[in-house]
Amino acid sequence: MTDALTRPAEATRIPAIPSRAAGTSGFEGTDAPGIVFELEDVAVHYGSTPAVEGVTMDIPARRITALIGPSGCGKSTLIRCLNRMNDLVDGARVSGRLTYRGIDLHDPRVDPVEVRRRIGMVFQKPNPFPKSVYDNIAFGPRVNGTRRNLDDIVEKALTDAALWDEVKDKLHASAFALSGGQQQRLCIARCLAVDPEVILMDEPCSALDPIATSRIEDLMADLRDRYTIVIVTHNMQQAARVSDYTAFITTDVVDGGSRVGHLVEFDRTEKLFTNPSDPRTEGYITGRFG
Ligand code: ADP
């Protein structure tokens, strides 16, 4: 398997060493193992309308980073930048600088398919393929050319997604026969099966009941030492429970009266929720608006 994000003919190695030393990254005093994404003045427009702009932040490796803020502030738009999912959204245009492991994600040599293998995504509504449990998990490895040890890969991914015990006797049943929470863990297992570094989760629990939600939260805690996780959630309690870092985004009214999302504050979750630096963050977390 290639270690490069770029198309093979123009391969660039992804540096193993983090692109910035922890001491200069805003993560002082933590043992965060490097930075995975660097965003500098990132903006997304739909057509000529800006949805979110001026976002500058570093996302640390093997930690959980939550994006919170009122509906419509641009959380989903922003998370979709991280694996170039906005390429697939009509009219969306991303500007600014956005690097993954020091590589400009919009460099024309970067292969978006490889980006999405390295940086998997789980959506609000579980979206298993209309296939068996087994074939859902084996799909990605097969596309990548893996023919051997598929059984082991499937078992490992399902085990890592805390689903194996529940499905080991129905691997060849339709994925649609699973409950909503199981389907969401199946989607997480499908990501894990292609050995990503990052898992993006866009409101992964909003279609689930509280028990299924808590199983996903437990699973995130299990995965956090091995993967970089970025989660969009409208649920502040969830962000406070699961994440290490939180970014608060809100909408400001700009010239002409349109509303645009801006990053207000990005900090350790504990600090942001107990001692926020910006009064707008405090207003949001104390329920004064949003
Ligand atoms: P959030 O995830 O915080 O609720 P979104 O990222 O979904 O916010 O939306 C941010 C803004 O971008 C909103 O004004 C929304 O209407 C707009 N928007 C989102 N997706 C699209 C799209 N595909 N086309 C046009 N506008 C969009």
Image: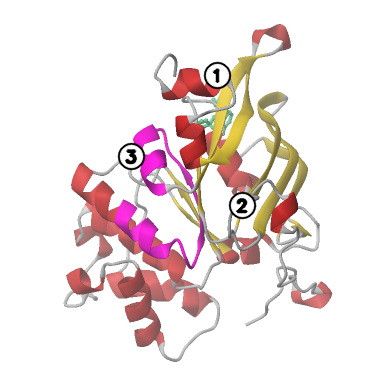
Amino acid under disc 1: Arg
Dot label at residue 29: 2
| Amino acid on which the number 3 mark rests in the picture | Ser
Gap in Å between the C-alphas at discs 3 and 1?
25 Å
- Compared to residue 4, the image places residue 239 above or below, namely above
Vertical placement of residue 283 versus 42, above or below: above
Q: Mark 3 = which residue?
A: 206
Q: Position of residue 115 (x, y in %)?
A: 64, 62
CB of mark 2 near ligand 1 (< 8 Å): no
Which of the two discs, 2 and 3, labels the residue nearer the N terminus?
A: 2
Sequence-wise, which precedes: disc 1 or disc 2? 2
Element type where label 1 sits in the image? helix
Report whether 286 appears left or right of 105. left
Secondary structure, mark 3, is: loop
- Label 2 sits on what residue type? Gly
Q: Quadrant of residue 35?
A: bottom right
